[in-house]
Image (cartoon, rainbow, N blue to C red):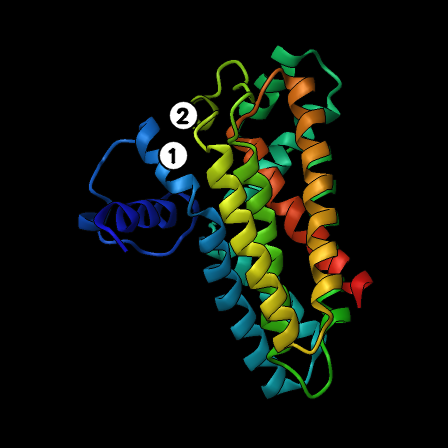
Amino acid sequence: MTARDRTGFALAVSMFSALPVPVRLIGTDRLDRPASRAALRWLPVLGALLGALAGAVGALLLIRTGSPLLAAVVVVLALALGTAALHLDGLADTADGLGSRAPAPAALEIMHRGDVGPFGVVVICGVLLLEVSTLVALIEPGHPWHLVAAVVVAAVTGRLGALHAGLPGIAAAGGSSFGSLVTGSVSHRSAVAITLLAAVATGALAVASDHSPVRWLLAQAAVLLILWWCRRAVTGRLGGITGDVFGALIELGTALSLLALVLAG
């Protein structure tokens, strides 16, 4: 790993998680376009790390208590705490903005507020309940560590959806500081390479957990397609991408991935 790679990963951890990062590794004290661009490319890797940590905690708790529900709840809490609920906040703000049915400028103003409205509460509760219930369904008796594979794949897939939102041709919504920093910052070549690497990892994790790699890959592809459609619909409604939309894509992608893995069997 080069010095630039280390800096990019450290920035990703600092910007998109609650994990501690030494200041010397970040190399900058201001958020600019190059820094955001470097960090965005590491989002899937960060997702794998957070998913592995949360999944391991859940697996250990499952071994200790034998309770799938308790393990699932702790995994979801660990994922939320691992990001300081940053992406859940983005999901809630996006839901409130879209649910208002207001014109784009007014919807964006609603999203910029610090409070959470009824649409945000309902969507967050729905996503968290979906994650817990699907994790319970994914837990296999006698195979607690298979849980880790599913959580890693889900966390990576959600962040792939956010990574794809940084491709060229996607505009930033008016007044979005983060959106203006990362729009067009991911080249098509980089996106394809990172997505292929994630697909290889997904196939390997499927095999390691005694599941069909083809089914897991099809599930991942289906979720990425849904996230692509959601991103197009939301940016068309708001006039561009925002930081909140990135968070919403991550949370929605994680929950949908877990559901897709349940359906894949």
The amino acid type, in three-letter code, at marker 1 is Arg
- Residue placed farthest to the left in the image? 24
Q: Look at 72% across and 41% down and name the residue there.
A: 225
- Examine the rendering and report whether any part of residue 129 can be seen: no
Of labels 1 and 2, earlier in sequence is 1
Quadrant location of the C terminus? bottom right
Q: Secondary structure at mark 1?
A: helix
Give the crowd class for mark 1: few <14, some 14-19, many >=20 residues within 10 Å: many
Disc 1 versus disc 2: distance between alpha carbons? 8 Å
Give 183 or 200, whichever is nearer the viewer.
Answer: 200
The N terminus lies in which quarter of the figure?
bottom left
The answer to whether residue 8 is above or below residue 79 is above
Q: Label 1, on which residue?
A: 37
Indicate which disc residue 181 carries: 2
Say which element carries label 2.
helix
Q: What is the total number of numbered labels drawn onto the structure image?
A: 2
